[in-house]
Amino acid sequence: MDNNINKYVEQEDGRYFEERLIITDDVDLNIRWTLQSVLAWLQEVAESHSRVYGYGFEDLKAKNACWVCLRYHLKFESYPRLYDKVHTYTWAEPARLGVYPRMFSLEDESGAALIRASSMWSIIDLDKRSMVNPVEQGLPPYPVRKIQNFNDLKPLAKIEIPEGEEKIYKYRPVYSDFDMNGHVNNTSYLLWFDNHFSLEDHRKYEVRELLIHYNQEVRPDVELDLKFVLAADKVYFSADSEAGNHFQMLAAID
């Protein structure tokens, strides 16, 4: 077990808790937890919780299936920094029409809010790349307890492209962009986003809100058009190919 992570089982109220120590690999030149590492941690703790009720990576792989993220909506009250301990809570909301909502709440040691997030997921067949019913695949019933939604975090909200300076770049994903399921990792897009901006930009500004839409996976050997639209307090970022839109994100900055 990594010595920077303390794992706990699901609590009585249905929430799952883990404590995370922010280490040097997690932070940028501002000693601030990076967006890519934040999202990677959310997905890691979601996987840990999913294993509790038989929906972990190995459980799904045995049925030739995997989790795929559809949407995220995150709000950053304050950024954890190097050697901070982050208390992470996650819980699954009841599935609806093949879509699985999951919430996250990250706090400091005193209980003050740091980051909140809502997300929506599906379970797909690894060969057909289409949604499957897990119970029909022999998996146990999915949790049906309703715990808490965040009314101000709507992952299905429409992304409005702001008025601003537009830039488009060609990009072909490389080895480090792909995950174990054979498509571009959900977190890679956030690294591409951060790498677009200068060191000075990262010193001056912080992302305060992210609305993310994953519309279709990116498989190997696909050339992408990465588009950025920069407004005064917002940045739109998307990834498109000949197959259509793969990814859209709207970031609120200050």
Image: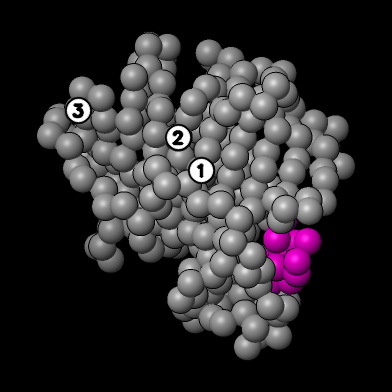
- Residue 73: image quadrant is top left
Q: Residue 118 location, x and y as percent? A: 49, 49
Residue hosting label 1: 117
Task: Report helix, strand or loop for mark 2.
Answer: strand
Label 3 environment density (alpha carbons within 10 Å; few <14, some 14–19, many ≥20): some
- Location of the N terminus by quadrant is top right
Q: Quick one: 149 or 2, which is closer to the camera?
A: 149
Residue 40 visible here: no
Q: Quick one: 212 or 179, which is closer to the camera?
A: 212
Q: CA distance from mark 1 to mark 3?
A: 24 Å
- The answer to whether mark 1 and mark 2 are in CB contact below 8 A is yes
Amino acid carrying label 2: it is Lys
Residue hosting label 3: 231
Magenta region, residue range: 48-60
- Residue 229: image quadrant is top left
Q: Quick one: 35 or 189, which is closer to the camera?
A: 35
Please give the label number shown on residue 75: 2
Amino acid carrying label 3: it is Ala
In the rendered structure, the answer to whether residue 231 lies left or right of residue 136 reads left
